[in-house]
Every structure is written in C-alpha cells, then in structure tokens.
Image (tube, grey):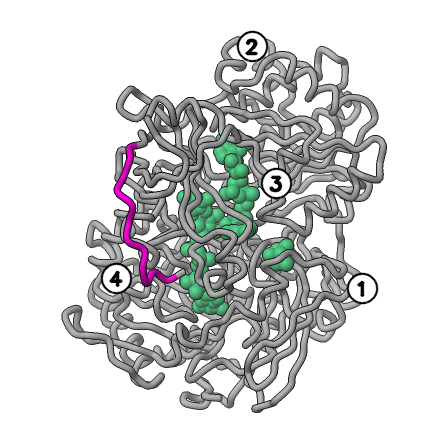
Amino acid sequence: MTSLASQQHAAPGDTLKRVTLKQAKATCPYCGVGCVVDVKSRDDRFVQITADPATAPNFGMLCPKGALLFKSDNPERRLTTPMMREHKDAPLREASWKEALTFIAGRITAIRDKRGQDRIAFYGSGQLDTEASYLFTKLFKGYLRTNQMDTNSRLCMSSAVAGYVKAFGSDGPPTCYADIESADTFVVLGANMTANHPVLFNRVRRRRATSDTSRIVVIDPRRSKTAEFADLHLPVKPGGDVALLLLVMRRLIELGELDRPFIDQHTEGYADLSALLENCDPRELHRLSGINADQIDAFAGMLAGDRRLLSFYCMGANQSTSGVDKNTAIINVHLMLGEVGKVGSGPFSLTGQPNAMGGREVGYLCHQLPGYRKVTDASHRAQMEEHWGIPAGSIQPTPGRSAVPMFQAAADGEIDVLWIACTNPAVSMPNVSISQAGLKRTGLVIVQDCFADTETAHYADVLLPAATWGEKSGTMTNSERLVTRSRAVKNAPGKAVPDWQIVAAVGRTMGFDGFDYTSPKQVWDELRQTTAGTLCDLSGMTNERLEQGGIHWPCPSEDHPGEPRRYTDQAFPTPTGRARFHAESPKQTDEQADPDYPLGVTTGRVAAQWHTRARTGNVPELVRQAPEPFIEINPLDADTHQIEDGQWVYAIGKRGRALAKARVTDSVGVGTVFLPFHWGDSFHPETTANFVTNDAVDSVSLQPELKFAAVRIEPAPAPTLEGVRS
Ligand SMILES: Nc1nc2c(c(=O)[nH]1)N[C@H]1C(S)=C(S)[C@@H](COP(=O)(O)OP(=O)(O)OC[C@H]3O[C@@H](n4cnc5c(=O)[nH]c(N)nc54)[C@H](O)[C@@H]3O)O[C@H]1N2
Ligand SMILES: Nc1nc2c(c(=O)[nH]1)N[C@H]1C(S)=C(S)[C@@H](COP(=O)(O)OP(=O)(O)OC[C@H]3O[C@@H](n4cnc5c(=O)[nH]c(N)nc54)[C@H](O)[C@@H]3O)O[C@H]1N2
Ligand code: SF4
Ligand SMILES: [Mo]
C-alpha cells in the first residue's frame, strides 16, 4: 500500500500488509448509535458483516444499512490518486502525493503571507474520526493561526451543544443507552428514530413491550414510522415546539407535578420561567403549536406521577431558528420534574453522524478548542498553546465564521483556499446556490474524499484520496459518549490514505514541527492528554483498553471504568453548581407561508439512504427501497394544487426549486409537505432539495433552519433519468 508518510518524512504508519483474509471490529460509519460490527474481508473486498451479542452498544443488533455495509464500497467510483490543476481553466490531472502536497503547502503559505491567514478556511465533518478532527484543529487553530474552521455539525448538533451549555454549563448528554431499560415515558421530539437511529429505537420498543408503565410520545409534524409506534402522537406545527412545551409545563404546574425540592436545591432561574408561564396566552400557544388542550392533557398525564422520563430529540429540534430554545425548553421540563441525573431519565440529544460527539471533544467548530475549551477564553488558549508547544498568542481569540457565513464569504470572494473533508456541501448546505457559488468562486478548492464523483468534487482544484471505513483505524464517540475504536480490515485502493495522515503530511510539508506522527496511536495519545482534567476527559482511554471494548467519558485515569451517567450527584458545571431554567417565548419560523408560497416544506431523511448517498447509493437493496426523490403532500393540498399521486412536481420556494415525485398521503398535515434531501446533482440537476431550504440561522447556535421554508407545488415534466447514479 502506498504510504503517504513514506513519501515524506516518517515511516509508514497505519498500513496493513497485503492479506487474503482479515477480520476486525469496526464502528459503523453511519449513524450516531455507533454500532460495533465484526468485519471480514478477503483480497481487499469486504465479505461479511456480523454483530457480536456481547459487544456494546448494539449487543448483536444491526439495521439494514449496517448489515449491508459489506456492499457499500464501489471500486469504480473510488478516488485512488491525488488529482490537481494549477489553473481553473485546466482539466484535473493525476499527481503524486509529493506534487499535490507541495502545491497545497505552497499555495497556503503564499496566501497566508500575502493576504492573511483568515482567507484560508476548512469545512469538515462529524464523519471524520477523532484523530483526523484533532489534527485539523491543531493545524488550523494552532499552526495556521486561524479559526476559519467549521464543520457540518453546525447544520446538525450546534443547537444541542448550545442548549446543554446554557442549561448545564457543559456540552454532552447526561444519559446513556442503558437508561432505556429503566425509563417509563419516552418523549421523542423531532426525531424519526425508526429510520435514523433504528437499533436504539428497537430497545425503546422492547422496553415499551415489556413494561406496563412505559409509554411513547412522539412530537413530529409528520406521522412518521416512529409516530406509528407511539401511544400519543402530537402533530406539532413545524417550529411550534416551544409553544407546545410551554403548554405542557403550565399543565404540569396545574397538576401539582413539580419536584419542588429539586428545583429549590439544584436549579436557578425558575422564577422567570414561572412568570412567563403565568403571563403567556394559552390560545396563542395552541395556535402556534397546532395542539389542542385535550392533547396537552394526554401528554401531561404521561409525564405525571412517579415516572422516569427519557427524552430523545434530534433535527426537528436543532435545525430551526429557535433550535436552542427548543433544546432548553425540553430541558426545562426535565428540571421541573427533577428528571435528570437519575437512572432511566434525562434529556438525550441524539447525535446524527458517527462522530458528531468526538469532533466536539477536540474542538472542530469555529468557537471551540480541544477538551470543551473555547477560543474566547484566554486561559483555554494558553493551555492549548502549551500542549502544542507553540508561541503564546498563536491561537486567535475570536471565533471564525460558522458554516453558513463561511460559504457566503466564499461566494463574496473573501476566501482564497477552501479545504473540504468528508462532507458534500454542494448538496447538503441550506440555500445551496450560495455554497455552489462559493465553491465556484474560491481560488483553491481542496476536496478530501474517498469517492471521485461527489457533487463537491466537481468543483475541486485538488482532490485528495482518503481511505474510508474499514480501511483505517481510528476512534469515534457515539450519542451516549461511548468511545469505540474502529479498525482497518482491508487496504485502501491505490494511493488513498487515512485522513489523519493527509492533514499531518500537509502540516509537515508546510514546515511545521508538530506533525511527525507515524501512527494513529500517537495522535490519540496526544489528544487524550489534552482533555485531561476537562469535563470530557478521555485521558484514561488507552488504545489497548479501547481494543477490549468501548468506554464512556469522562474517564480520567487508566484504571477508571468510565461514567455512563453524568450529574448523578446533582452538581452541575455552572458557576453556582445549579442547572439553569430558561424562559423563552415562542418565536415564529424565519419565513412564513403566504399566498404565493402557501405551504411549509420540512426536510429530512429516509431509512434506506444516508445523506447524499455516497455510500448507500452503492447498495442495490437500499436503492430499491428508496430509488428516487419524493415529496409527501396531504390529499387536500394535492387537490388544491391539482396534483396526482406519483406525478413529478416542483417545490418552488423563494430561493429556488426542487424536483420530486408527489406522494399523496395523510401522514403530513394540511399545509405541510415533506421533502428528503438525499438526491443531489449526480442524480438529476434539479432534484437538490436544498435549492429551496432557508439559510436563516438560530442567533445563538448559528444552526440553519433546514426544517422550514415556504413553497408552492406545481406540476413538472417527468425528468429523463436514464444513466443516473443511484
Ligand atoms: N437512514 C439514515 N439515518 C440517519 C441519517 C441519514 O441520512 N439516513 N443521518 C444521520 C444524521 S447526520 C442525523 S443528524 C440524524 C437525523 O435524524 P432525525 O432528526 O431523526 O432526522 P430527520 O428526518 O432530519 O428529522 C426528524 C423529524 O423531524 C421532524 N420535524 C420537522 N420539523 C419539525 C419541527 O418543527 N418540530 C418537530 N418536533 N419535528 C419536526 C420531521 O418530520 C422528521 O420526521 O440521522 C442520522 N441517521
Ligand atoms: N435539507 C436538509 N439538508 C440537510 C439536513 C437536513 O435535515 N435537511 N441535514 C444536515 C445534516 S444534520 C448533516 S449531518 C449534513 C450531512 O451532509 P454531508 O456531510 O454533506 O453528507 P454525506 O453524504 O454524509 O457526505 C459525506 C462525504 O464524505 C465522504 N466520505 C466517506 N467516508 C470518508 C472518509 O473516511 N474520509 C473522507 N475524507 N471522506 C469520506 C463521502 O464520500 C461523502 O462525499 O446534511 C445537512 N443538510
Ligand atoms: S443503527 Fe446506525 S450505527 Fe447501528 S447499524 Fe444502523 S446505521 Fe449503523
Ligand atoms: Mo447530521
């Protein structure tokens, strides 16, 4: 196997000898459940995936995406060599690693020296392992001295991060999966767990089936598959969650359900919330939420009494201009009932991507540093400068641009180098015309991916071939803070190498002395020490220990077993040690339906596809289940717009339009349509859902409102789909 390192300074690191049959444990590269699988390969092809009943967190269970992982590669689509062009009008050509690295290092150095380091930006992903995420942070924030670095977690988890920090003083969930087996009431808000966290939802269903006290409440504008399993489905209006939760809090007070001792001893800010609840107009809250008093009564009834409450929430909460308020409102309910820090209870934000938790631990958002540190805190900067052995003052004190303004700046010509790894923003950014314009305008676009033909790769001036799942060893943290180590089981094709090696090689080629790693273990050992003594302490997790199985953080020493639950002593990492209530009134979505755009579109996922289909599109069984883009529309709206089931339509919004096949169904309410976002340009030039979505952001988390835009629906000619990439 070609080793990047061997072409540069150090010896080959994480490489494998050619083998015929190999097997190892790996972490599923899809969702934040973080299932561990046993992988077998023969002659560098995956041949079998199984799951071991004794191994956490999935204990033998897998969903179809995970079970079919052995079919997820497509050798013909792989990027097997660096590709580059010196000028925009030249075609891409094959290059050696040395040539590509020298070119990148030269251009970055020149831009930094002539135009300033803030014209160099990085956009990463919660699908990178922790080692690669850490090295990107070190290279950009430490050595290039710029905080112009953000990731697709901004579109995903940033409202949850802000919500936890506001309420508890720290990011990271208090809960763990084992809480499911002790919980009574499950509230699932803005999460379609049957499709998107299937193995976890199996556990919820098993608990519901075996416990007399267990109930499931689903809060979702759609009657999703998950809602079909609910004892109570509350079809909230898109964006109406804060209003709904205020109503239920009022009802809980009326019922006398408050945990007064907990509120008095362990929280602050209740008086403001109580005043808000007293003064708000319930009729207005019913109007905003679309939920009536009987439904609220039924909901409150399931929270009342001595029940353990476990809430799961995901993108229906986070992807909103009131995303942070939704998160703190859910936590308010838990604090009122004293349902946190106890076995079987707590507010449980689900992570989407397999390492959306791990990236946060090493500071991969524009305001963060490793160990839940912040760039705005002088002592945090000084600590990291010491860890990295770089001069005081190297780390900049202001956050860089977050994802949406980063691509806007690129479109405005304010960025000269944009390095993108493990994400496909030409499809997944809201208001994608802007991100596409940014990719077009930026002088040097570097795309680091395992596949050659992604929509974003189309804009690249340099393509860097990454080894992918099953071809590299590295560490990830799942939704419950369980850290697992995924191992290589086959060689990467051609010259592809693991992401961490690529970052390290760029650092070395630029002449920086902090990047002489020969193995992922060295990177891990360094990064876990940077978290020692912090809230997300990984320092006790050696690679050797992780080889034996996953460990929950915090894990402060090598003999520490890890902590599945946090805040069990009711001490919170706020200045007063108390958890904080937040009193926020409901806000409208940024955009409202109007006579020209009378419907609200909400977007999301289907079980058989993963985001922009880079991997799931290779698996025939999955493609057959979800072969083409569709839009769900209520029969009454279909009638008004004269749309037939199965006909192609345009969803036309204020920023653009998207083509999809109409599915007339009452699973969406009147006035709402649902459009998955999986089918980008490689399927058809007009099917990208994000031509329509809104790039307005939550003012605190800066997360965009991917879950609401105003649209109208019009019939469209059937597209020609021969030869599309599935
Ligand atoms: N099969 C599959 N699994 C995945 C992924 C995938 O692409 N495919 N992606 C992974 C990633 S990165 C993520 S982030 C997660 C996402 O997981 P989820 O959040 O479960 O996924 P979504 O389908 O985006 O949205 C969830 C639900 O939010 C609802 N919703 C929309 N607006 C609102 C609202 O205002 N309020 C409420 N209460 N609900 C609303 C939608 O109707 C939808 O059913 O899934 C992960 N798992
Ligand atoms: N309308 C709408 N838009 C959304 C959302 C929504 O709900 N609605 N959700 C948002 C959310 S939550 C998310 S997380 C994003 C996800 O959006 P993206 O991150 O853009 O989606 P992916 O298709 O997962 O892109 C991953 C890329 O990484 C590549 N890759 C896979 N493995 C490796 C590897 O090991 N190394 C490298 N270097 N590359 C690799 C794949 O080939 C693929 O090109 O979408 C966001 N966009
Ligand atoms: S539930 Fe998630 S982590 Fe588990 S096998 Fe399915 S996609 Fe992979
Ligand atoms: Mo996500």
Is residue 155 among what the camera can see?
no
What is the x, y in percent for residue 575? 63, 38
Identify the mark at residue 116; answer none if there is no mark: 4
What is the x, y in percent for residue 651? 32, 36
Is residue 719 among what the camera can see?
yes
Tag 4: Cα neighbours inside 10 Å, few (<14), some, or many (≥20)? some
Q: Amino acid at mark 4?
A: Gly
> Is disc 1 in contact with disc 2, using a CB cutoff of under 8 Å?
no
For disc 3, does the CB lie below 8 Å from ligand 1? Answer: no
- State the CA–CA distance, disc 2 to disc 4: 54 Å
What is the x, y in percent for residue 532? 65, 61
Dominant secondary structure of the magenta stretch? Answer: loop
**Quarter-of-image position of residue 136:** bottom left
What is the x, y in percent for residue 88? 17, 68
Given residues 22 and 354, the one toward you in this image is 22
Residue highlighted by disc 3:
169
Secondary structure, mark 3, is: loop
**Mark 3 / mark 1, whichever is N-terminal:** 1
Secondary structure, mark 4, is: loop
**Mark 4 / mark 3, whichever is N-terminal:** 4
